[in-house]
Amino acid sequence: MTEYSDLDLTPDTKTMLHLPAHERAAACCRDIWVEYPSAFLATERVKSLVSLPRCSYNPGMMLVGLSGAGKSRLAQRWVEQSWESESVWAGRLIYVDMSEDTENLDVRKRVIEEIGKACGRPEIRTVQQARRIIREYGIVAIIIDELGETEEAIVKRHWKANLLAVRGFASGAWGVNLILVGIPAFLEAVMLNEQLRSRFANRVARLNYWTENDDLAAFVLGYVRHMPMRQVSAVATDRFIGALLQYSLAAQSGATYAYASLRSIVDLLKETFRQALLSGKEYVTEANLLITYKQMGGNMGLDPKDRPKLTVLVKGDKPPKILDSSKMGSSKNAK
């Protein structure tokens, strides 16, 4: 182990260096958390929110980011930390993912179910039972993910009932802060609803758009500290960061632009390190990224040399419209 003491790896990762390559390759796929600026700021805002005294009305908050930005993983991390024995959080959090059970899109029922699961009380069914357990277990916040995505899947009256339930969670009877997680379009929908706007407008945390900048470079360097490689990988270069970003972009058909997804970036990183170890290498370079990209069939199998460089969109950018070639000859479009 002493021969690897100079490697900048986490302590847990260093303990894996004696393992054979195939075991370390499997370890590359484990769940890893790397702190980054916008996630840190969001966490501090939530900690501040849930530390407020319980009142007759408890304010809510929204966590907003593009699909694949890392919203759900961040919210789940908050919950995990809040249930630890020596947690620094003011109380415990409950996480509800509305996409997990599409046959049950009643938000009140789902919240009660998740409270029961988290507290080892799956038999609870009523609001009164849930409120008692909230007090008993010191639950201070409920996080609801993907609520906005359910609007089109249920009839209008059920959607209204869900909105009423969301408003009700802010009451003193529940004694919790409600945190809604969604994409920017959901934030816009909330801002158009007068009842919801007054509850969530003041507190919004946004996960940054990923682009070729210091934040992404810092994230990659932090991530590599968890990869059990016996040699130093050349990941701090502009060429590596630029290639990682380009190969992880997924544009619509015919588009020359895309938003970067943290989910895709992490997936490509994991697989690159895994494949390198399985091929007998103890480090990765930009060349390994390209090899892995081709093996994965990235961007629908297009070779980088056969596709134009994509423009990475950031906050404030408005994607240009993609022309439908099938309509180009119509008289309506010709005018």
Image: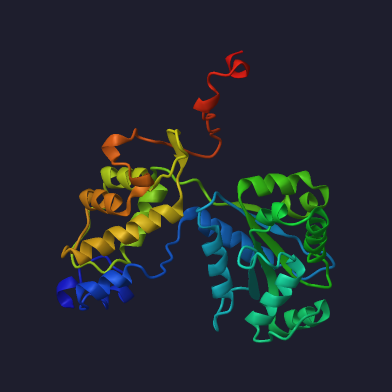
> Residue, x 27% and y 43% (percent of image)?
239
> Residue, x 69% and y 86% (percent of image)?
121
Q: Is residue 93 left or right of residue 241?
A: right
Nearer to us in this view, 327 or 142: 327
Residue 229 visible in the current orientation: yes
Q: Is residue 153 left or right of residue 205?
A: right
By what rule are the colours in the image chosen? Answer: rainbow
Q: Is residue 314 left or right of residue 50?
A: left
**Residue 21 falls in image quadrant:** bottom left
- Rendered view: 14 above or below 189: below
Number of residue marks = 0
Nearer to us in this view, 175 or 261: 261
Q: Which quarter of the image is occupied by the C terminus?
A: top right
Q: Position of residue 261 (x, y in %)?
A: 46, 50
Q: Is residue 150 left or right of residue 169?
A: left
Q: Which quarter of the image is occupied by the N terminus?
A: bottom left
Q: Position of residue 12 (x, y in %)?
A: 32, 76
Q: Position of residue 238 (x, y in %)?
A: 29, 43
**Residue 281 falls in image quadrant:** bottom left
**Residue 102 falls in image quadrant:** bottom right
Q: Position of residue 262 (x, y in %)?
A: 45, 53
Residue 323 visible in the current orientation: no
- Rendered view: 118 above or below 49: below
The single residue placed furthest to the top in the displayed view is: 335
Nearer to us in this view, 184 or 46: 184
Nearer to us in this view, 241 or 236: 241
